């Protein structure tokens, strides 16, 4: 693979069709758009390249959602990149995690736009109208996926809906959040109409109609969240009734199945979407490909686990793990009932010994199978990341009902009882919206959803500041959570490239 370099993420619109293997594909050399699109396979591979921008998606969720939330209390001895994220520091515009989010998502947008441009100009080469429509729908789904990721982190965004020149890019400012959402919704509606419900063979893992419906439901729910008086993802639109039919269609017709064994959802032997019926949409990885481990395998399993843990296992030769421990908060650990199987599976609370030292602080280990630690590269873990799972579809339905969409308390209690029964914590009755969010916290811990759940709840500031007062009582490292910190700053590099084009988000 040849890397894609940007002088600025938007201003340097350099197309390269090289890709990482999230689907079954062969990496492409850096052909230009003028010479590359000569066969149907070229269009398929270019579509695969759009998927490649998903490669770091789970790592981003852990670094910018999980660490930001009340699930993590980062207490590094040496200041690391995650500390200012955890501590609500003001001067984080140059933070590497924030820069990566903007850069990589817009990278995916640019590749989607290029594919769409070439289908319009040279689509006859594809030879099949059905395939051309499907590839267009995949590109629009992914473009919407990347924009939705961006809007939750940054709020207002430049809408880049076509291939633009470098000079034109420097004139496109940020559009209001409502306009960006309209753009996202149009792409997802097209995808729902034109994506197939399933795939076979090497196409398994591509976006389906159900994935598009799930993301559109998430969009309606995010828009319906509180505004907090900022230009963030919440618009208080009260569109729960628009999300619910999409969720019901997935539940009724999608063929997904609630897995009664929590650990099995994340098993390394249950990876294929055709087998793992909890997986509505996954980021696909392949480990064990010689010489290309950083392109095909995953690294997210160890992002929130310390390198000293792997050293204690004698597995330090490929440097798995974060540079220091990133502890799970005591508040989250203590929130689980004693019988809750999700706690033992997701969090290491037993401690470990390394180089004569003992570490007793808890850390996330949900994706770590110590029998599957790669031996050649820390970027070579052979496990997919379930970006949308069926349990979430059910819990989003329960939330919509509690917010006023059609349905009953019995429907809500039935969904939560099913989830608690799997967890070993019993049945549920008269579940409230606050209890639902607490159940989500335990169910999806270490999956990167907590910060976005807090955004949508309307209680982010109350919950976070109460948690900071308690969790940070002794060390006093964290700043108070304020409304402006619900979204992140526009990366400093983007500000520097074209001064004055983007107004920085307030508070930074």
Image: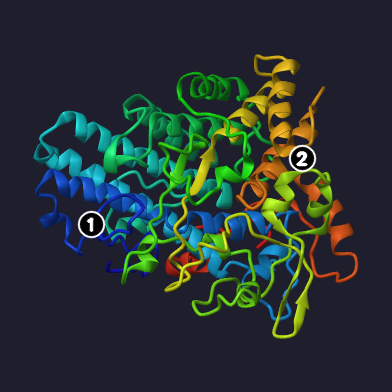
Q: Residue at x 81, y 23 (%)?
A: 429
Picture quarter with the C terminus: bottom right
Q: 31 or 95: nearer the eye?
A: 31
Mark 1 in CB contact with mark 2 (< 8 angstroms): no
**Disc 2 element:** helix
Residue identified by numbered label 2 = 438
Q: 494 or 41: nearer the eye?
A: 41
Q: Residue furthest bottom?
A: 355
Give the number of marks. Answer: 2
Direction from residue 93 to residue 188 in the image, left or right: left
How far across and how far down the image is residue 452, in percent? 64, 45
Kindly indicate the quadrant of the structure image that contains residue 80. bottom right
Kindly indicate the quadrant of the structure image that contains residue 81. bottom right
Q: 320 or 489: nearer the eye?
A: 320
Report the disc number at residue 26: 1
How far across and how far down the image is residue 168, in percent? 31, 55
Q: Can residue 228 be seen here?
A: no
How far across and how far down the image is residue 197, in percent? 37, 27
Q: 30 or 322: nearer the eye?
A: 322
Disc 1/disc 2 C-alpha distance (Å): 43 Å
Q: Residue at x 49, y 24 (%)?
A: 250
Q: Can residue 437 be seen here?
A: yes
Compared to residue 282, the image places residue 72 above or below, namely: below
Q: Residue at x 47, y 54 (%)?
A: 383
């Amino acid at each position: 693979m040849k890397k894609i370099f940007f002088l600025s993420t938007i201003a340097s619109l350099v197309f390269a069709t090289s890709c990482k293997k999230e689907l079954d594909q062969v990496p492409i050399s850096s052909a230009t758009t003028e010479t590359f699109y000569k066969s149907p396979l070229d269009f398929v591979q270019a579509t695969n390249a759009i998927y490649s921008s998903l490669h770091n998606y789970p790592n981003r969720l852990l670094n910018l959602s999980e660490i930001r939330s009340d699930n993590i209390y980062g207490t590094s001895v040496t200041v690391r990149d995650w500390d200012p994220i955890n501590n609500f520091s003001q001067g984080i515009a140059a933070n590497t995690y924030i820069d990566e989010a903007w850069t990589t998502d817009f990278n995916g947008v640019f590749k989607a736009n290029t594919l769409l441009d070439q289908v319009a100009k040279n689509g006859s080469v594809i030879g099949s109208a059905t395939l051309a429509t499907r590839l267009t729908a995949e590109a629009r789904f992914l473009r919407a996926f990347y924009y939705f990721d961006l809007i939750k982190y940054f709020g207002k965004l430049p809408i880049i809906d076509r291939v633009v020149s470098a000079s034109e890019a420097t004139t496109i400012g940020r559009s209001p959040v409502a306009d960006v959402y309209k753009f996202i919704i149009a792409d997802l509606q097209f995808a729902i109409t034109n994506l197939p419900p399933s795939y076979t063979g090497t196409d398994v893992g591509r976006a389906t109609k159900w994935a598009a419906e799930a993301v559109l439901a998430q969009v309606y729910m995010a828009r319906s969240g509180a505004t907090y008086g900022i230009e963030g993802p919440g618009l208080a639109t009260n569109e729960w009734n628009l999300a619910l039919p999409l969720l019901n269609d997935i539940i009724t017709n999608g063929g997904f199945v609630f897995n009664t064994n929590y650990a099995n959802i994340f098993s390394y032997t249950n990876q294929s979407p055709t087998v793992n019926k909890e997986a509505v949409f996954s980021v696909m990885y392949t480990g064990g490909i010689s010489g290309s481990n950083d392109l095909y395998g995953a690294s997210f399993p160890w992002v929130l686990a310390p390198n000293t843990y792997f050293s204690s296992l004698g597995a330090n030769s490929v440097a798995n793990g974060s540079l220091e421990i990133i502890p799970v908060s005591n508040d989250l650990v203590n929130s689980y009932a004693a019988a809750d199987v999700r706690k033992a599976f997701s969090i290491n609370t037993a401690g470990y010994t390394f180089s004569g030292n003992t570490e007793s602080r808890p850390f996330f280990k949900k994706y770590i199978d110590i029998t599957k630690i790669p031996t050649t590269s820390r970027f070579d873990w052979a496990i997919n990341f379930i970006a949308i799972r069926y349990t979430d579809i059910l819990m989003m339905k329960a939330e919509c009902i509690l917010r006023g969409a059609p349905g009953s308390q019995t429907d809500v209690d039935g969904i939560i009882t099913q989830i608690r029964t799997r967890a070993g914590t019993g049945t549920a009755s008269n579940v409230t919206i606050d209890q639902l969010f607490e159940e989500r916290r335990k169910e999806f811990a270490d999956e990167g959803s907590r910060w976005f759940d807090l955004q949508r709840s309307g209680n982010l500031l109350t919950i976070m500041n109460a948690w900071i007062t308690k969790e940070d009582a002794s060390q006093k490292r964290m700043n108070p959570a304020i409304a402006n910190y619900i979204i992140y700053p526009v990366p400093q590099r983007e500000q520097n490239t074209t001064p004055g084009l983007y107004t920085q988000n307030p508070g930074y």
